[in-house]
Each structure stands twice: as C-alpha cells, then as structure tokens.
Image (tube, rainbow, N blue to C red):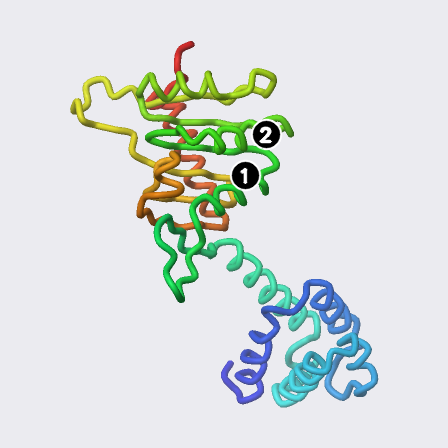
C-alpha cells in the first residue's frame, strides 16, 4: 500500500512516538470506539488531546490523511489504534535499550568541559542504589568510599565486591568496614596458572543493574582526587549485562569468595 494517504499516515503515526502513554491509551480508545474518525469535530479533538494544541493539530492531520487513505472502510480505527500502540511501545523499548552515556574525569578542571568528577559520580551511584551494588576494583583503599558503601549496606543494599587477589585489599576492607554494618561479599580472581603479572584490572561500580561507572581510576584517594583518570557513566539496561557477566564468572568458579 503506497497511496498518498497511506504515506501521510505512516509519517504522522511515527510522530506519536513521544506522546504520553495515558494520551496514547485515550486516543487509541477513541479510535477503537469510533469517537475519533474522519470528520470528528474540533471540540472533540480538543477534549481527546487534553487541550494540548500541538497534539490536537497532529490529530487533525492524522484524520485528514486517514480520510485520503479511504477512512474507516479501508483502515478501521482499531487498526490505527494498534499502530499507535506499536509506535509507543517501540519508542519505550528503544529508550530502555539505548543507554545514556556521560564522560567522567579525575584531573585538572578543564574550562568548557562537561565531564563530571569520578568521586561525584560514584557518590551519586551509591545514593541511588536500592537493591544491589557491584564493586569491582584492582585496589580499594579510599576510606570515605568504604564508609559510603557500608552506609548503603546499613539501609539494606546488598554489596558485592570483586577485588584483585592481593591480601592487602581484603585486610583493609575488614579493618575499615564498620563492625555493625552488614558485611559485603568479597570475591577475587585467583590467577593461579596465569602469568605472574596478570591482574584483575577492572574498575567498575554498578547500581541495581541500571547505572554503572566504568573507569580507569582505582578506587583510591589518588584515583578519585589527584590522578588523571577517565571513564564513562552508563545508564540503561545494558548495565545488567555487565552484572550478569560477573554472576557467570562466579558460577563458573573463575571468581571466588575470599577465604576468611
């Protein structure tokens, strides 16, 4: 089908991608029960559009193109309603699948740069967490950061830490972590037969499988304050893939809990 009316409908329907779900439901219902069809009065359009002039105009154009395409006899209102639902659902899924990304930086302040500081981003990630924090690092020695992780644990957040296989990491955590806070799960990668210089070199903080900092910065005072470090803050469903990867590493016995 490629009539002018059909082409016009196709382009107009695509413009509804950002329309509020409640309004989409209202428009689809009106299309389905015949309230909205070619020839519908401007007063009815205004009521359906909830006095949104831009949406009202878009609906009027939609009805005009619908009429050119043959109206209800060729394209039932229920069909247009389904198309609207598909557009809205596609937009919703796209927003979930496409993550937002921000630049994160430790180092000298750069005029004109929009980068956020590493310490600020980590604090924000911790504060927004409601269920689970995954912390992966080569070194974790920033005592203020340990305190913030422990405060998250005190409000019910499950904290999992995967640290480089260095006894100093586990020792410092046990000495620094408050005794009255729920203890984090401590895991590591026993390098075993790997090259003697092999390291767990990842630096990552992930919140609830939805937000994550991936950075060059160790979770140390130098990494958060004095070095020159760069990373990305990622917000979106893709973060869940990173968390599941570490779940799979543990299930496969590649990373293991640190012995007491």
Vertical placement of 156 versus 62: above or below?
above
Q: Position of residue 214 (x, y in %)?
A: 39, 44
Q: Residue at x 70, y 74 (%)?
A: 77
Name the residue that disc number 1 marks: 126
Quarter of the image for the C terminus: give it.
Answer: top left
As helix, strand or loop, the secondary structure at mark 2 comes to helix
Circle on res. 94:
none
Picture coordinates of residue 197 (x, y %)?
18, 26
Quarter assignment of residue 203: top left
Counting from the top left corner in percent of width and height, residue 72 is at 70, 80
Q: Dot 2: few (<14), some (14–19), or many (≥20) neighbours within 10 Å?
A: some
Other-residue count near label 1 (Cα within 10 Å), few / some / many at <14 / 14–19 / ≥20: many
Mark 2–mark 1 Cα distance, whole angstroms, equals 9 Å
Where on the picture, by quarter, is residue 43?
bottom right
Helix, strand or loop at mark 1: helix
Q: Nearer the viewer, residue 234 or 174?
A: 174
Name the spot of residue 258 as percent of width and height, x first.
Answer: 39, 16
Q: Nearer the viewer, residue 144 or 114?
A: 144
Is residue 137 toward the left or the right of residue 18 in the image? left
The mark nearer the N terminus, 2 or 1, is 1
Task: Identify which residue, 73 or 158, lies in the foreground.
Answer: 158
At x 55% / y 20%, what residue is drawn? 178
The residue that appears at 59% across and 42% down in the rendered structure is 128
212 left or right, relative to 155:
left
Q: Which residue is mark 2?
A: 151
Q: Going by the image, does 95 lie left or right of 199?
A: right
Badge 2 vs badge 1, beta-carbon distance below 8 Å: yes
Location of residue 143 with respect to 39 vertically, above or below: above
């Amino acid at each position: 089908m490629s009539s002018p009316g059909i082409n016009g409908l196709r382009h107009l329907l695509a413009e509804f991608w950002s329309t509020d779900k409640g309004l989409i439901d209202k428009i689809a219902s009106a299309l389905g029960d015949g309230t909205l069809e070619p020839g519908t009065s401007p007063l009815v359009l205004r009521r359906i559009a909830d006095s949104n002039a831009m949406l009202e105009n878009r609906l009027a154009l939609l009805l005009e193109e619908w009429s050119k395409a043959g109206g209800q006899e060729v394209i039932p209102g229920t069909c247009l309603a389904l198309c609207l639902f598909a557009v809205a659902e596609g937009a919703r899924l796209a927003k979930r699948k496409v993550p937002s990304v921000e630049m994160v930086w430790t180092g000298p302040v750069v005029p004109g740069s929009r980068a956020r500081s590493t310490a600020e981003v980590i604090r924000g990630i911790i504060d927004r967490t409601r269920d689970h924090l995954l912390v992966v690092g080569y070194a974790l020695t920033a005592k203020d950061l340990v305190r913030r992780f422990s405060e998250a644990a005190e409000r019910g957040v499950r904290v999992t830490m995967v640290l480089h296989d260095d006894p100093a990491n586990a020792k410092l955590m046990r000495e620094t972590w408050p005794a009255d806070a729920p203890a984090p799960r401590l895991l590591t990668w026993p390098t075993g037969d790997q090259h003697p210089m092999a390291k767990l070199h990842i630096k990552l903080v992930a919140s609830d499988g939805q937000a994550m900092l991936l950075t060059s910065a160790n979770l140390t005072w130098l990494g958060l304050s004095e070095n020159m470090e760069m990373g990305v803050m990622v917000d979106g469903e893709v973060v869940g893939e990173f968390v599941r990867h570490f779940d799979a590493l543990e299930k496969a016995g590649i990373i293991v809990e640190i012995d007491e």
